[in-house]
Image: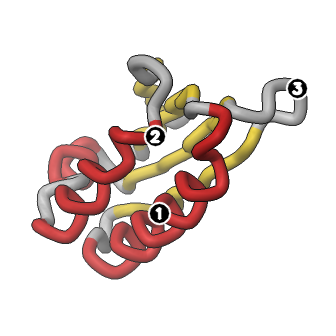
Amino acid sequence: MAVGIVATLNIQPDKTDEFEENFKQLMAIVAEKEPGNNWYALHRSRDEEATYIVMEQYVDQAALDQHGKSDEFKAQSAKLGAFLAGAPTISILDAV
């Protein structure tokens, strides 16, 4: 069964452009290194400019468990922490 994730990220307002550039690099890493990932996409809120939603889907729980284990992913995601304005909110969902 496919597994989805919805993560809400609040970014420091003066760092949104830099965040987006770095996140696009992370999306490329996921596409290249995680064959069990169906999609991994960043969306910006229309109502709150510094709020982003990450939508992800993995073929199964094992693929989700593998998510983010590459050295490249770890390095890029560590950089993204510097842009956060607080802890992300993450929901894990089962496909129907």
Label 2 close to label 1 by CB (< 8 Å): yes
Label 1, secondary structure: give it: helix
Measured in 3D between alpha carbons, the distance from the residue under mark 2 to the one under mark 1, in whole angstroms, is 10 Å
Disc 1 residue type (three-letter)? Asn
Colour scheme in use: secondary structure
Quick one: label 1, few (<14), some, or many (20+) residues within 10 Å? some
Q: Which of marks 1 and 3 precedes in the sequence?
A: 1
Q: Nearer the viewer, mark 3 or mark 2?
A: 2
Instruction: Find the distance from the CA under tag 3 to the CA under tag 2.
Output: 19 Å
Mark 3 crowdedness (10 Å alpha carbons): few <14, some 14-19, many ≥20: few
Question: Three-letter amino acid code at disc 2?
Answer: Phe
Which residue does the image show at 24% across and 49% down from the upper left? 78
Residue placed under numbered mark 1 in the picture = 22
Number of disc labels: 3
For image coordinates 18% across by 56% down, the residue present is: 74
Q: Are marks 3 and 1 in contact (CB under 8 Å)?
A: no
- Quick one: quadrant of the N terminus? top left
State which tag comes first along the sequence, 3 or 2.
3
**Furthest residue toward front:** 14
Q: CA distance from mark 3 to mark 1?
A: 22 Å
Q: Quadrant of residue 90?
A: top left
Q: Is residue 47 above or below residue 22?
A: above
Residue receiving disc 3: 47
SS at badge 2: helix
Residue most extreme to the bottom:
32
Is 11 on the left-hand or right-hand side of 1? Answer: right
Q: For mark 2, what is the residue?
A: 83
Looking at the image, residue 15 sits to the left or right of residue 71; the answer is right
Which numbered disc, 2 or 1, marks the residue that appears first in the sequence? 1
Amino acid at pointer 3: Asp
